[in-house]
Amino acid sequence: MKKEGGTMSQETRLNAGNRWILIIVVAIALMFVVASCQREPVAATCSIPEIEDATTVADQSCDAETTEEAVEKTEEQWCEVLTPEQYEILRKKGTERPFSGQYVHHHEDGVYRCAACGNPLFSSEHKFDSGTGWPSFWEQVDPNAVTTRPDHSLGRVRTEVLCAKCGSHLGHVFEDGPNPTGMRYCINSLALEFEGEEGETEASEE
Ligand SMILES: [Zn+2]
């Protein structure tokens, strides 16, 4: 009797053991699913070999708050679409060396778009030579083109300028610009992409 009882309880213990293994396997599987949805953005470096996984995660609408207008990408994806120099400015708030940018002395008519998402940001109509070494504008092309926020880095209080559509860093705005606004949007060339006015080649063929 005792022996039988002994084997019975051993079997029960075995079954219980199997059940635990099952539970643990399921729990681990669940943890993977949750982890893939809570992916932390990769810190600083730009060395992500595969983008496939990140794309899938983004497509699966993990974050339901995305508005239709906004452009949201993971840092891996920005890494993939931007040059290392652009990534440094746009995503890591870098600043290009003065007079190094291609648009400092650029005077063609057209629109300067966000180099990250293509959002129209500034017009050649509002561009002026500030002498600072960075492309400068006294106004954004549209009241909702850019957003601003306080920047306390480098021991100074400045106002950071960001693309309203994708949140990328563009430069800073100061209140020492020319009329009519008195503002000076000091923008990195690397954050911009110029698009000339089509069909209006200075009307020189008349
Ligand atoms: Zn943008």
Image: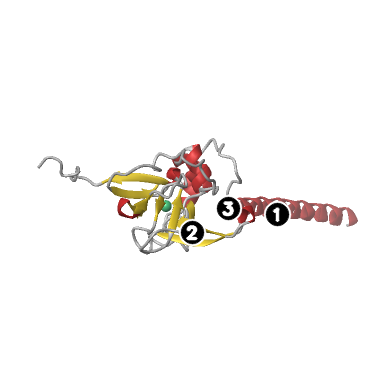
The residue lying toward the viewer, choosing from 183 and 201, is: 183
The residue lying toward the viewer, choosing from 76 and 30, is: 76
The crowding category of the residue bearing disc 2, from other C-alpha atoms within 10 Å (few below 14, some 14 to 19, many at least 20), is some
Which corner quadrant of the image does residue 27 belong to?
A: bottom right
- Residue drawn at x 46%, y 52% as measured from the top left: 186
In three-dimensional space, the C-alpha distance between marks 1 and 3, rounded to whole angstroms, equals: 21 Å
Question: Residue tagged by mark 2?
Answer: 174
Q: Amino acid at mark 3?
A: Val
The numbered mark, 1 or 3, whose residue comes first in the sequence reads: 1
In three-dimensional space, the C-alpha distance between marks 3 and 2, rounded to whole angstroms, equals: 46 Å
Question: Residue tagged by mark 3?
Answer: 33
The numbered mark, 3 or 2, whose residue comes first in the sequence reads: 3
Q: Secondary structure at mark 3?
A: helix
Q: Amino acid at mark 2?
A: Phe
- In the picture, which quadrant includes the N terminus? bottom right
Q: Secondary structure at mark 2?
A: strand
Residue 19 is marked as: 1
- Residue drawn at x 75%, y 55% as measured from the top left: 16
- Residue drawn at x 12%, y 40% as measured from the top left: 205
